[in-house]
Image (cartoon, coloured by chain):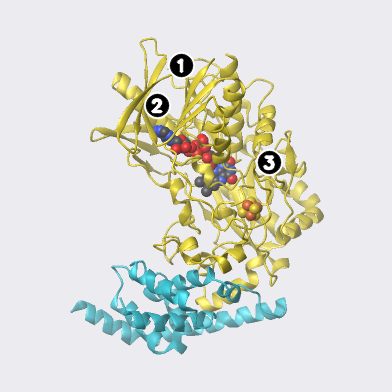
Amino acid sequence: MKRVLIVGSGASGVHFAQTALEHGAQVTMLDVGRVAPAPVLPDASFARFKREHADPAGYFLGSKFESVLFPGAKGEYYGFPPHKGFIFAPLERFRMRASGFDPLTSFARGGLAEAWTGGSFPFNAQELADFTLGPEGLLANYGRVAARIGISGADDDLSRFTPVHEHLAPGLPLDPHSAQLFERYGREREHLNTRLGAWMGRTRAAVRADDREGRNGCTNLGRCLWSCPREALYTPSLTLRALLKHERFTYLSGRHVARFEADESNRVRRVRAVELATGREEVHEVESLVLAAGTLASAKLFLDSLRAHGGRAPALAGLMDNRQVLVPFVNLAMLRRRYQSDSYQYHQLAMGFERPDPRHYVHGLVTTLKTALIHPIVQSVPFDLKSALWIFRNAHAALGIVNVNFHDDRRPGNRVELEADGDSTRLVVQYAPSNDEPERMKAALATVKKALSKLGCVVPPGMAHVRPMGASVHYAGTLPMSATRAPLTTSPAGESHDIAGLYFADGTTFPFLPAKNLTFTLMANADRIAQAWARA
Amino acid sequence: MADRATLERECAAFARYLGAGAGDAYVTEQYVAAHEAGVVELPGTTGFERSVVALARALPWSLRALDAHARVFGNGSLLRRKLVLLLAILETRAPHDEALDTPTAGSNLGMFVRMAWLGAVFATLVVVTALLLLPVRVVSLAGGAR
Ligand SMILES: Cc1cc2nc3c(=O)[nH]c(=O)nc-3n(C[C@H](O)[C@H](O)[C@H](O)COP(=O)(O)OP(=O)(O)OC[C@H]3O[C@@H](n4cnc5c(N)ncnc54)[C@H](O)[C@@H]3O)c2cc1C
Ligand code: SF4
């Protein structure tokens, strides 16, 4: 029986584990694995929650009011809900500093995708061209993962950019604002497609409409941002929960894996972990080791191991992330309507924008404003708060945002490396955007604004917000897969070309990052790598 | 930080200004708790900011004008922080959430006319308060210099 040890229980780790188990392997998973608090009032809608919860301010704003966005605060328009703090809480043993990049890491059970918004858009053949995958691509893997987690969407105008895979379930019912936009798109389609190269379709999201396999279907509670209490919105901890029932699966949480060790022939032999509660060091012998700790944490683990082995660790070049620009809009046809609070909260529509080079495709997620904390938005209206509130309440149902995503390439200057920090090490992340970024962004945003205008929407001047690099949390590219054997790369099957028996199942091996959210591809790729590993 | 009774009165006056009646006991409790947690009045708060809040407390009818002034000349100032905090608390709590976030009756045209009116009033208030508050600012600065 083949044995594998996996580091990390995020989207990448759990899908590698599930496939490995399906192929008869013995799987051990080591994870820091911080646990989520139990759901509160699981059947209450957003509106009912505010009526029935004894301490709604404590729930939404935090016991220390840490989720209040005060005026003048720098950063994003929204704060993460307090009870999601476990996802992003730093770990003292993981030290990092960054320039040009705002990195997020997670040491939670399920990883960063415990907080994700579920956008699941498969990469097409052009976007996968550098992935050295062979003619079969990832389509079958997308289908397998979709069957596991539940992906809703439709075969529509966006399919020209986003392949249709098996087990694509019908999209959730559209909220009134999204329905109005989609209907208007139908009327303006010809102009938008031919003149602007702009296309619209139902979003692809990891959310289930029906009750299945111990999860409840979406009942439009409108609490997605505060963690779906019905488990309709997929998170990796749900897969982990299912894996825990498997007799060939061992899960050891509360462990921080410090490094691995290889023998003289550069074959991985063991990992050294620390049990966080006791500080006790553990040694685990391994046949195969899979790093799925997230691109940044996997890089640190890899570099710390090389450093302990040979005294020096190289820099890993090619870090990628999607630049995101938030373009708010007001849909004039929706002014003065009551917003629908009982509705799936995240994006229900998506837009694709053609570019001369298809790999530079620009992707937009269209979120209409429904349930949300309103104080960050109201205070941004350039009036006194009373007038701002009056304007907001009449415009709430008409507000929306397009989250415009741009592709990224591997460039040598964007890298991660180690620096000494006392008797420990720190990961240093350096990132600078490409020289042509301002020009690309300007051209694409002009098209986005024209398309919105054609849909009857106004973009308030000066309100587009360029998010800092790192904010999209789509990290990839530090040890790319390569058909030719070269140092600091991996084989197409995800095995390190430097250390035999060491695999990467997360974004580490991506050689290119299209403008689409990558996590569905992380899961599909982890499934592919696990199959290749199991058959090897 | 002001004492509890002052904060309670302040909370009721500010809630009325935002259109949520006088709030309720829970809202007041949260408002006071946030002040006690030290997230409202930051170390750099100036004497002028405190004077503006004292004025708002003493003359609640002037709140809109003081808020307009703060929006332009001190968006992160004490008065704005207090108002935004209270808005955040009110929006988490029924029935205030509804009171704050339900569209008003009327036509779209009426809405645009009202917005233009709100804009004109806002601009006027900013200019008038800039002049009226000048002495308060000077006195506060002089106090600070001592
Ligand atoms: C707010 C938000 C919204 C997002 N929305 C989307 C979206 O809509 N669509 C999309 O595609 N993506 C989205 N993402 C990105 C997505 O969450 C990540 O791409 C994805 O979670 C990465 O998964 P991963 O398994 O590779 O790594 P991670 O999620 O980072 O998981 C890492 C795991 O490794 C463990 N670990 C790390 N280091 C160690 C160590 N040394 N020892 C032991 N265990 C360790 C951690 O405990 C964790 O379990 C979003 C992210 C955020 C934050
Ligand atoms: S609307 Fe969101 S929170 Fe409610 S059931 Fe659906 S996915 Fe869950």
Locate residue A125, reporting x and y percent.
68, 29
How crowded pointer 2 is (Cα within 10 Å; few <14, some 14-19, many 20+) is rated as some
Question: Which quarter of the picture shows residue A235?
Answer: top right
Locate residue A260, reporting x and y percent.
38, 23
Q: Chain in cyan?
A: B
Query: Nearer the N terminus, badge 2 or badge 1?
Result: 1
In the picture, the disc for residue A155 is none
Which residue position holds label 2?
A302
- Residue at mark 2 to residue at mark 1: CA–CA distance: 17 Å
Q: Amino acid at mark 1?
A: Glu
Residue appearing at x 66%, y 81% in the figure: B113
Which residue position holds label 3?
A151
Label 1 chain ID: A
Which residue position holds label 1?
A287
Label 3, secondary structure: give it: strand
Vertical comparison of A51 with A343: above or below: below
Q: Nearer the viewer, mark 3 or mark 2?
A: 3
Look at chain A in the picture and name its colour: yellow
Locate residue B76, reporting x and y percent.
40, 69
Q: Would you say residue B110 is visible in this rendering?
A: yes
Vertical comparison of B106 with A274: above or below: below
Please identify the quadrant where the C terminus of chain A is shown.
top right
Label 3 chain ID: A
Left or right position of A75 against A518: left
Label 2 chain ID: A
Label 2, secondary structure: give it: helix
The residue closer to the viewer here, B13 or A17, is A17
Q: Residue at the far left: name it.
A: B146
Do the residues indicated by labels 2 and 1 lie within the same chain of the protein?
yes
Q: Residue at the far top: name it.
A: A265
Question: Which quarter of the picture shows residue B145?
Answer: bottom left
Q: Nearer the viewer, mark 2 or mark 1?
A: 1
